[in-house]
Image: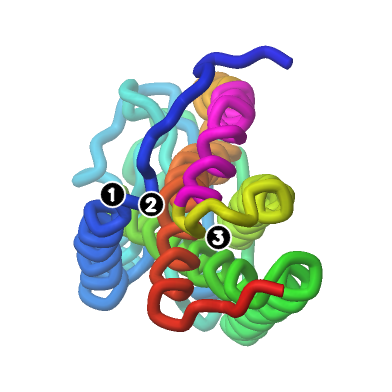
Amino acid sequence: MIEIVKDTNIDFVGRRKYGFIFSGIVIAIALSLILIKGPNYGIDFMGGALLQIRFSESITTAELRNTLAQIGYGQASIQALGKEKKEYTIRASISDPGEFAKALRNELTENYPQNQQEILREETVEPKIGRELMIKMFWAIALALVLILIYVSLRFDYRFGTAAVIALFHDAIITIGVLVLTQRQFSIIVVGALLTVIGYSINDSIVVSDRIRENMKKMRREPFNVVLNTGVNETLSRTLLTLGTTLLAVLALLIFGGSVIADFAFTLLIGFIVGTYSTIIIVGGIVSVWEEKFPKKKK
């Protein structure tokens, strides 16, 4: 097997407090952003209308907002796609999205007759559907976490299962915080990306936990923290290789995939990095503290 780091002996468990402090600070910032600023919910959750429009000539955000104000939607969200200022997405949460789309097209044609417009995308979602999608999203994530906890606890140890689920919350909160910070659109596609991140992170945790379980049989006389460190170090090369190859594909999607898939790829990029960090630092650290506080009797 290819190894990018060989024979490492890094004391990850001994440095766990630094990881806990760093993660605690980042999670506090992420939660503050989520609660104060709030996610930039997409059309799937807010309900209303979304238009993606391409113009033949450049047009400013201010000009578009003035047009929206003339039809009573000055608070609509406007996002430029690209630096040329020729393509925009416009979102508005209203009770009659079809009427909004029609009124906006008519007003743009009247105000900018020389600037030809092309409607690339038009989506309408009623608010009721948006609420249903949001409820289903939370149920999907909650069910996934419960099943993961049961599976890891049965296959390995309840301590590893609990630590893995805590790490998943850690990964999800930080990733969502970055999405809020960058004002990426929180859509059903991003929810799919978050679930993918959860699957990636738990897979990493299972690989490390499996190696630790093997070492616990071979290193019975060694201290528990030494067994944890050995397992993490032995799988470190595999963990970093997996992250590197995965990020190459995600970066290709982010750079060449276009605006439609950009939020999905960005979520994967942040989530995979955070998930790898939590696998190396957080899971083993939690299990180590648990063992110190409530040592498990050796059979």
Residue nearest the viewer, comparing 236 with 42: 236
The residue segment tinted magenta is: 226-247
Position of 259 with respect to 160 (left or right) is left
What amino acid type should be assigned to the residue bearing mark 3?
Ser
Residue in the image at 64% along x and 80% along y: 142
Magenta stretch contains residue 248: no
Category of crowding for the residue at label 3, using alpha-carbon neighbours closer than 10 angstroms: few (below 14), some (14–19), many (at least 20): many
Residue nearest the viewer, comparing 218 with 277: 218
Residue in the image at 23% along x and 53% along y: 18
Query: Could you tell me residue 197's position as x and y percent?
Result: 60, 51
Q: Which residue is mark 3?
A: 187
**Dominant secondary structure of the magenta stretch?**
helix
Task: Tell me the tag on residue 73.
Answer: none
Position of 63 with respect to 170 (left or right) is left
Q: Which residue is mark 2?
A: 13
Task: Look at the numbered disc 3 and give the secondary structure of its residue.
Answer: loop
- Please identify the quarter of the rendering in which residue 109 is found: top left
What amino acid type should be assigned to the residue bearing mark 1?
Arg
Position of 148 with respect to 292 (left or right) is right
Return the disc, 2 or 3, that comes first in the chain's sequence.
2
